Amino acid sequence: MEDLVHTYPLSLDDGGEIERRLNLHTEGRIVPWAIIDPVTSRAVGMTTYLNLEPANRRLEIGSTWIGSKAQRTGINAAAKMLLLQRAFEELGCIAMEFRAHWHNHQSRRAIERLGAKQDGILRNHTIFENGTVRDTVVFSVVEAEWPTVKFGLVERLGALQR
């Protein structure tokens, strides 16, 4: 996971972020997932179900961090396919949300490639410790779009295996 440390804003080498996510999971606030490369069986990242809203049958997939060597390999699309499939087909969600920092163009493009549509921008959404303010871009996939999004992901992943 060495290359992952360089793409994540917090230090992962002491396990602090992983421990934080596990504690939030124990509290029922998030569901963290490890992203494992099926070829090497090594952890290459993590992602999370968060902003869980069972009453509204929706949740967010976010806080995704993937090591640089695993980026643009299809592993993110495969992980998101599994998470979306579970949410829509097993958990009965009617909407799945994704969020990205306005300036994180790489993440925004990755979310769009999944088939999510941009819903809007939350202006001045978050104030960071250093005083900078984040605008958050919100994307979603809704239940009616899932069959088409799933088809696109299956085709994309199949093309990567050819």
Image (cartoon, helix red, strand yellow):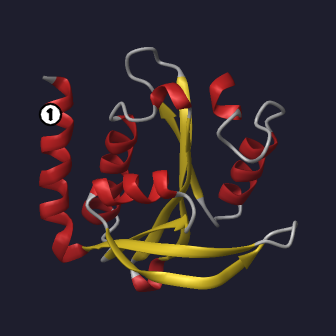
Number of numbered markers: 1
Quarter occupied by residue 90: bottom left
Q: For this view, does 104 lie left or right of residue 112? A: right
> For the residue marked with disc 1, what is the amino acid?
Gly
The vertical placement of 47 against 117, above or below, is: above
Percent coordinates x, y for residue 19 in the rendering? 77, 44
Q: Residue at x 31, y 66 (%)?
A: 116
- Quadrant holding the C terminus: top left
Q: Secondary structure at mark 1?
A: helix
Q: Is residue 89 left or right of residue 14?
A: left
Q: Horizontally, is 114 left or right of 102 in the view?
A: left
Tell me residue 17's x, y (percent): 75, 46
User: Residue 49: x, y in percent?
Assistant: 51, 60
| The N terminus sits in image quarter | top right
- Residue sitting at 61 percent across and 76 percent down? 135
Q: Name the residue beneath numbered marker 1.
A: 158
Check disc 1: other Cα within 10 Å, few if <14, some if 14-19, many if 20+.
Answer: few
- Residue 93 or residue 68, whichever sits in front: 68
Left or right? Give the position of 143 relative to 119: left
Visible in this render: residue 91? Answer: yes
Above-or-below relation of 121 to 40: below
